[in-house]
């Protein structure tokens, strides 16, 4: 069984390994923002646990060995993190975030030129783009989920 540090390093590599330092820090920040969410779904489901947040069903493609009934080769079990992934995991776990990153709880790669203004619904609003990922902060509605 992997430690929380190992899981986070593997998720960082899998979800944002090609996004540079800022992109990897941003993804780690989303995970830790969920771990530390004061209310709402992630507080209730995560209970302050990195493991619970990473393995919450339907949240991170990289945490799933199958997608749409097919084997997903890009999953955390197939990752081989380098020192940078562990360093970023350590930084995120210790509370370090990118400056002005906000409280982003979601990210996604739109595979298009622009980001939606809300994601995953009206509970998140567009905050910033880093690399190929759009990041979203919670609206007040999120805290009632």
Image (cartoon, grey):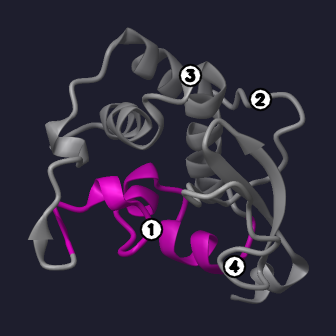
Closer to the camera: disc 4 or disc 2? Answer: 2
Closer to the camera: disc 3 or disc 2? Answer: 3
Q: Residue at x 42, y 22 (%)?
A: 85
Tag 2 secondary structure: loop
Within-10-Å neighbours for mark 3: few <14, some 14–19, many 20+: few
Within-10-Å neighbours for mark 2: few <14, some 14–19, many 20+: some
The earlier-in-sequence mark between 3 and 2 is 3
Q: Residue 36 occupies which quadrant of the picture?
A: bottom right
Tag 3 secondary structure: helix
Q: Circle 1 is placed at which residue position?
A: 59
Q: Residue at x 65, y 77 (%)?
A: 120
Within-10-Å neighbours for mark 1: few <14, some 14–19, many 20+: few
Q: Circle 4 is placed at which residue position?
A: 40
Q: Are marks 3 and 2 in contact (CB under 8 Å)?
A: no
Q: Quadrant of the C terminus?
A: bottom right
Q: Circle 3 is placed at which residue position?
A: 20
Closer to the camera: disc 3 or disc 4? Answer: 3
Q: What segment is highlighted magenta in the picture?
A: 38-67
Tag 4 secondary structure: helix
Q: Residue at x 70, y 74 (%)?
A: 119
As drawn, 145 above or below 76 = below
The earlier-in-sequence mark between 1 and 4 is 4
Q: Position of residue 81 (x, y in %)?
A: 29, 22
């Amino acid at each position: 069984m992997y430690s929380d540090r190992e899981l986070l390093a593997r998720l960082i590599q899998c979800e944002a390994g090609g996004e540079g330092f800022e992109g990897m820090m941003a993804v780690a920040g989303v995970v830790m923002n969920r771990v530390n969410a004061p209310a709402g779904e992630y507080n209730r489901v995560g209970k302050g646990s990195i493991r619970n947040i990473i393995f919450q069903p339907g949240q991170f493609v990289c945490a799933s060995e199958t997608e749409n009934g097919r084997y997903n080769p890009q999953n955390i079990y197939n990752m081989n993190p380098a020192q940078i992934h562990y360093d970023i995991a350590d930084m995120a776990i210790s509370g370090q975030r990118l400056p002005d990153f906000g409280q982003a709880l979601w990210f996604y790669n739109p595979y298009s030129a622009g980001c939606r203004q809300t994601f995953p619904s009206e509970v998140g609003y567009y905050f910033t783009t880093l690399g190929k990922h759009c990041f979203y902060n919670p609206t007040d509605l999120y805290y009632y989920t």
